[in-house]
Image (cartoon, rainbow, N blue to C red):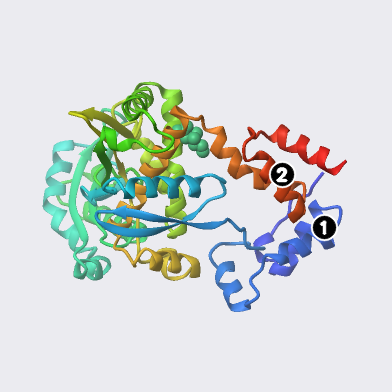
Amino acid sequence: MNNAIAGFSKLTKEEKINWIANEYFANPADAVATIKQYWNSDPKLQQLHDEFIENTISNFYLPMGIAPNFLINGKYYSVPMVIEESSVVAAAAKSAKYWSTRGGFKATVLNTEKIGQVHFLFKGDTAKLTSFFDTIKTNLIASTESITKNMQKRGGGITSLELRNKTTELENYFQLHATFETKDSMGANFINSCLEQLAKTLKEEAENYAGFNNSEKDITVVMSILSNYVPNCIVRAEVSCKVEELAEKKIENPQEFAEKLVQAVRIAEIELFRAVTHNKGIMNGVDAVVLATGNDFRAVEAGVHAYASRNGQYSSLSHAKIENGVFTFWMEIPLALGTVGGLTSLHPLVKMALEILGKPSAPELMQVVAVAGLAQNFAALRSLTTTGIQEGHMKMHINNILNQFQTTAEERKIIKSHFENTSISHASVVEFIEKLRK
Ligand code: MEV
């Protein structure tokens, strides 16, 4: 039985580590050594990482890889990816190279609107609330001036503010529904600060509004927060070529390949169980770049999956068609990303990732991320409809098995050459290692 602890956050880092090591490990000294093994040798850099979050004890490594040869709107990118799944970077790189000889990826940002809401309760005459809102709207926006000043200089700010009546869904429930342009920042802090100011002004103005009776003056602000649903912050990514140009070594019959791929997409469009996995494959690419560039992958995930259900049924994010002998594969996804603020100038590897991408604007990063998602989806569908997914997966996963068995360089050579032309499964690799060692 482990014990609870009071005041953990007030302990020093050393004390926290000792408590964890003594509480959860038979050999505390080993645990402490493992935790410290992943510290940065430069104490200043370690402090930087420590301060990203609360109660830091160590750094959690994930591999950072590069998928080169992404031709997007006529420009080549090497795309940094941070992910633990063994086959993702290889698949991205393979798709990138494949499409680079077929016109590359086209990507377009359709819009960049962010949303935030003040959720409040108003008990009284709705018509009076509407005219109150019309009267104070300019004051509401003006009250955010000190927060929006800098953003406005960069061409951003609050772009609209509406009163929304939600009382048919929930008694007394109204919203201030605001839209924002946050330029190259993801804008979460900016939006939330604006919303909290709007809420404060709303309440103050209501208290002083002569047209309200006492209960109407007493607006209850429930919360003020941005929305991670951004259906008007959309980027489109696309590839397209003549069907016969799809041919390559492993695609001998391009017409059959294209038809099967279109069919696979149609299945994901109408079948929930498949749609979720299909979209997960897209998010393998999306999240890896989102993480590498220091963006909020939970926000992106939440927004993307909500968007996938926007028509009432969760469905494929990507689409494919063959028309007049031309194969087209595309998707539109919402992506609220930033290339300034947040971790972007703090995390040394995030800074590097953005440099590798040529210091993109947020819209340019949206394009790269969407393309990474589409490339990943293409790679998955290509494998699924031809060789099956396990061939590629196991080829990459074999390294994990070899590490698990702490194989020597010599053993690795023998094992890898054996499995070059033999089907790989966890069991077959383990069996081979065991035989080899006998
Ligand atoms: C695995 O991480 C992702 C796939 O399952 C995606 C898909 O099935 O389309 C291969």
Q: Position of residue 116 (x, y in %)?
A: 29, 49
Q: Residue 174, located in which quarter of the rendered image?
A: top left
Residue at (33%, 35%) from the top-left corner? 318
> Which numbered disc covers residue 212?
none
Q: Is residue 209 left or right of residue 290?
A: left
Q: Residue 140, located in which quarter of the rendered image?
A: bottom left
Q: Along the line of sight, which residue is nearer the eye, 146 or 254? A: 254
Q: Is residue 397 left or right of residue 140?
A: right
Judge the density around disc 2: few (<14), some (14-19), many (≥20) Cα neighbours within 10 Å: some
Mark 2–mark 1 Cα distance, whole angstroms, equals 40 Å
Q: What SS does tag 1 mark?
A: helix
Q: Residue 248, located in which quarter of the rendered image?
A: top left
> Which numbered disc covers residue 22?
1
Considering only vertical position in the picture, is 103 above or below 384? below
Inspect the image, locate mark 1, and give the three-letter code of the amino acid beneath it. Answer: Asn
Residue at (83%, 59%) from the top-left corner? 28
Which residue is the site of mark 2? Answer: 415
Q: Is label 2 or label 1 in front?
A: 2
Q: Earlier in the sequence, mark 2 or mark 1?
A: 1
Inspect the image, locate mark 2, and give the three-letter code of the amino acid beneath it. Answer: Ile
